Image (spheres, helix red, strand yellow):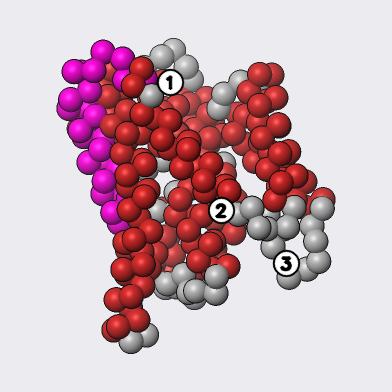
């Protein structure tokens, strides 16, 4: 790859990271504030964001830490929330097949929801999902995630009710836009509808966080059942 092509991919990656950095900032600060309120220190809150790096499962974790709950149940609950990353890895893995092993391992660590969506969208457009593009997008999101956590953990005590501001609603809105970005795919509507209905039913019947995995599995099951002709994406 020429130097100019690599530079163009880095710029594309940085551009792709910007809306994610903005939309995830309130969620990161909310996590930091709630983590401290639930007994974590500022350093522990930031360390959790830097090592776990998964907003939804971090929220589940801080709600369960310190309670009289068996450790294995905490781990299982977090796995239930993060199960979707198994599906992400299976999908994106084919696009990273030519990467060096160390780069692939690092790439899977940074494979959060928007990273997956943008990588899939880029691949469908016939553009390469190269390490230059991928890590140029991933690095700012990662760095600002634990910076936002530090801000929330440090200054969150000034806000009496972090949930009351409603800023954490920005991230679900971003996710909704992310899902809509795949609407041109075959069977998009029935698969999204099946996943959504299954998730809502599971939330009422089984409870959180299991509804996340159950909804994902329902969508995968329908996609497999109604798979179109080989060679065409079906989800």
Label 2 or label 3, whichever lies nearer to me, is 2
Q: Nearer the viewer, residue 95 or 166?
A: 166
The range drawn in magenta is 138-163
How many marks on residues?
Answer: 3
Helix or strand or loop: what does disc 2 sit on?
loop
Is 32 a magenta residue?
no
Which of the marked residues, 1 or 2, is nearer the chain's N terminus?
A: 1
Label the magenta part by its dominant secondary structure: helix
Q: Position of residue 181 (x, y in %)?
A: 56, 53
Query: On the picture, is 51 further left or further right than 172?
Result: left
Label 2 sits on residue: 181
Residue name at image x 49 percent, y 74 percent: 127
Label 1 sits on residue: 64
Kindly report the distance in space between the C-alpha atoms of the residues bearing marks 3 and 1.
42 Å
Helix or strand or loop: what does disc 3 sit on?
loop
- Cβ–Cβ below 8 Å for labels 2 and 3? no
Q: Nearer the viewer, residue 32 or 4?
A: 4
Q: Nearer the viewer, residue 106 or 186?
A: 186
């Amino acid at each position: 790859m020429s130097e100019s092509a690599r530079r163009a991919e880095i710029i594309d990656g940085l551009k792709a990271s910007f809306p994610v950095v903005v939309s995830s900032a309130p969620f990161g600060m909310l996590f930091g504030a709630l983590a401290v309120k639930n007994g974590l220190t500022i350093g522990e809150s930031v360390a959790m964001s830097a090592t776990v790096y998964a907003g939804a499962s971090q929220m589940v974790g801080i709600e369960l830490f310190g309670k009289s709950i068996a450790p294995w149940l905490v781990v299982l609950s977090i796995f239930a929330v993060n199960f979707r990353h198994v599906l992400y890895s299976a999908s994106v893995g084919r696009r990273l097949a030519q990467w060096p092993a160390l780069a692939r391992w690092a790439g899977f660590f940074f494979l959060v929801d928007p990273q997956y969506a943008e990588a899939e969208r880029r691949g469908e457009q016939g553009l390469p999902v190269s390490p230059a593009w991928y890590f140029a997008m991933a690095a700012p999101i990662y760095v600002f995630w634990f910076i936002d956590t530090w801000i929330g953990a440090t200054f969150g005590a000034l806000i009496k009710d972090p949930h009351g501001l409603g800023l954490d609603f920005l991230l679900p809105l971003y996710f909704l836009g992310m899902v809509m970005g795949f609407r041109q795919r075959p069977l998009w509507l029935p698969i999204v509808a099946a996943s959504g209905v299954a998730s809502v039913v599971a939330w009422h019947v089984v409870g959180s966080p299991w509804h996340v995995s159950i909804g994902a599995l329902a969508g995968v099951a329908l996609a497999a059942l109604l798979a179109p002709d080989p060679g065409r994406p079906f989800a």
